[in-house]
Amino acid sequence: MKEKNTLYGLVAEFADSSAVLKATQRAYANGYRNMDAYSPFPIHGLAEALGRRRTAVPLIVLLSGMTGGLGGYFMEWYSMRVDFPFNIGGRPLHSWPAFIPITFELTVLCAALSAIIGMLALNRLPEPYHPIFNAPGFERASVDRFFLCIESADPKFTLTDTRNFLQDLNPIQVTEVRA
Amino acid sequence: MNEALRAALTRWQKIALVAGLIGLAFCVLGAVVRTPQFFVSYLFGYLFWLGLALGCFGVAMIHHLTGGRWGNVTRRFLEAGFMTLPVMAVLFVPVFFGLRFLYPWAKPALVAEDEVLRHRRVYENPGMFIGRSVLFFAIWIIMAWLLRKWSVQQDGTTDPAPTRRLRKLSGPGIVIYPVTATFAYVDWIMSLEPDWYSTMFPVIIFIGQFLSAFAFAIILLAWFRREPPFVGVVSTTHFHHLGNLLLTFVMFWTYVSFGQLLIIWSGNLPQEITWYLHRIAGGWKWIVVLLALFHFFLPFFLLLFRANKQRVVILMSIAMVVFLVHIVNVFWMVVPSFYPQGIRIHWLDIAAPIGVGGIWIAVFLANLKSRRLMPQNDPRMQPVILHAK
């Protein structure tokens, strides 16, 4: 358990979406990487400004989708061809058109589930405690305020420089957030 | 529109018109020396381009209802596309003269010996066919004319009333169009094979029309992206969204096409399965392979990747493949009814799509030149365009 008074980061509060977008772009240009922005609604371009990285989610979805599809097809082929051959209307035992719906459904099911579970896992969610909620007035991040938090874990982070940098962006206020 | 662009469009219009007239001249020659083949080829070539016009019509109405910045930048292409409908109605007239070469129900000898056709004669006879076609074209042309009129009206005023009217028409319109077109395509394509019925078939036709319209819009937007008023407004985001829609309709087309195959294959009833037997006989099965590869697998897998949808040249190439292979798709739906033993490609199968297509493109470009290339004052679009990267 971390000590109560470790610094998590410095958070700047803004009144509108374009201000937080500009602030994020400038922070990124200044070399800050460990940071996050909080907003009541999606802001176009904000993810890119934060330096969105490629994630493993597409790969996870592709692999699970293929597993689901191949697994579904194999299940049908195995039950029809090997385990319990059954003559239906004189069709071949391995009748691929009839196997496609299940193959398709299992592809979609596995891909969709793995997309949600993979997204949650890579975001380390659910996360019952997060230091950002110690920021004063942070509940307005889901109403009408926009926050940019530069985390102390960032290699470029120093209390005075980062505070000065954030002050220069004309925020409503800059506060320290304890972990 | 600047003068250089206008001049370029005028030049293309002339090229298209000349190509169209040459194609139609060959069609006239064909009509004299190879009359039955002419009607088959003409029906196929005509239905592809009519499908593109109707696809533009449907996609434009979808956009009026859903909004989205993809439609704002492509709307004038779609409008110019569906405003070809009056000319397409005129170009349909030759088919009326070929009914007895095309449709079993119009051949008295066949009707006399086929009980089903005899019973259907009340509904399927030349008079009813022509009457229904005229009625449907009238409905589509009136709706298309109103969609265009109000859209152009909005250019001149900031009052959102024209956009509201566009939405009010598009709501019922998106129902009226498939309902009327279902009857139309039962007449025009399904009744080529007298005993074949499929409730899914008109849906396959519409989805193919939407797909070709999306591919067409992507190709044009890619060509125009460096021209005013598109330069600075059209971004990778627009292409990304259009690419997603193209992917959606590639999958939708595959879904309904396979759905019909699965149902008919499972039922395996003589009068239903013959439609597919005609379409895999002889060389036709290579067309099926071509369609599976280029109408589904290739665009599907390429469009899964975000980078391919954001790189304009790649997306345009995929759209081009989809557009061209959709011509083959229409060919495969129409022509095997006449050559159930195996594939036959006649020179008229090349001349007819070029003839109709040249005229179509010339009319399309004339429509495109006559108005602003970007709709103005759309009340839903102002902030989006301002914030677009």
Image (cartoon, coloured by chain):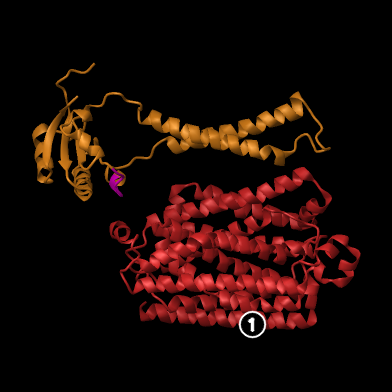
Quick check: B5 left or right of A61?
left
Q: Please give the chain letter of the residue carrying mark 1.
A: B
Q: What residue span does the magenta drawing correspond to?
A: A41-46
Residue A43 vs residue B304, the one in the foreground: A43
Quadrant (top left/top right/bottom left/bottom right) for the C terminus of chain B: bottom left
Quick check: B228 left or right of B245?
left
Disc 1 crowd rating (10 Å Cα; few below 14, some 14-19, many 20+) is some
Quadrant (top left/top right/bottom left/bottom right) for the N terminus of chain B: bottom left
Dominant secondary structure of the residues highlighted in magenta in the image: loop
Quadrant of res A86: top right
**Residue B319: x percent and y percent?**
52, 59
Report the residue marked by disc 1.
B22
Residue A114 vs residue B306, the one in the foreground: A114
**Residue B101: x percent and y percent?**
80, 73
Q: In this view, which residue lies farthest toward the right? A: B113
**Residue A110: x percent and y percent?**
53, 33
Residue shown at the point (72%, 54%) measured from the top left: B198
Residue shown at the point (65%, 58%) measured from the top left: B202
Residue B283 vs residue B296, the one in the foreground: B296
Q: Is residue B239 magenta?
A: no
The kind of residue tagged 1 is Ile
Residue shown at the point (24%, 16%) measured from the top left: A1
Up-down relation of residue B382 to residue B12 (above or below): above
Quick check: B31 left or right of B365?
right
Quadrant of res B322: bottom right
Residue B353 visible to an observer of this rendering: no
SS category of the residue bearing label 1? helix
Quadrant of res A82: top right
Residue shown at the point (77%, 83%) measured from the top left: B32
| Chain rendered red | B
Q: Colour of chain A?
A: orange
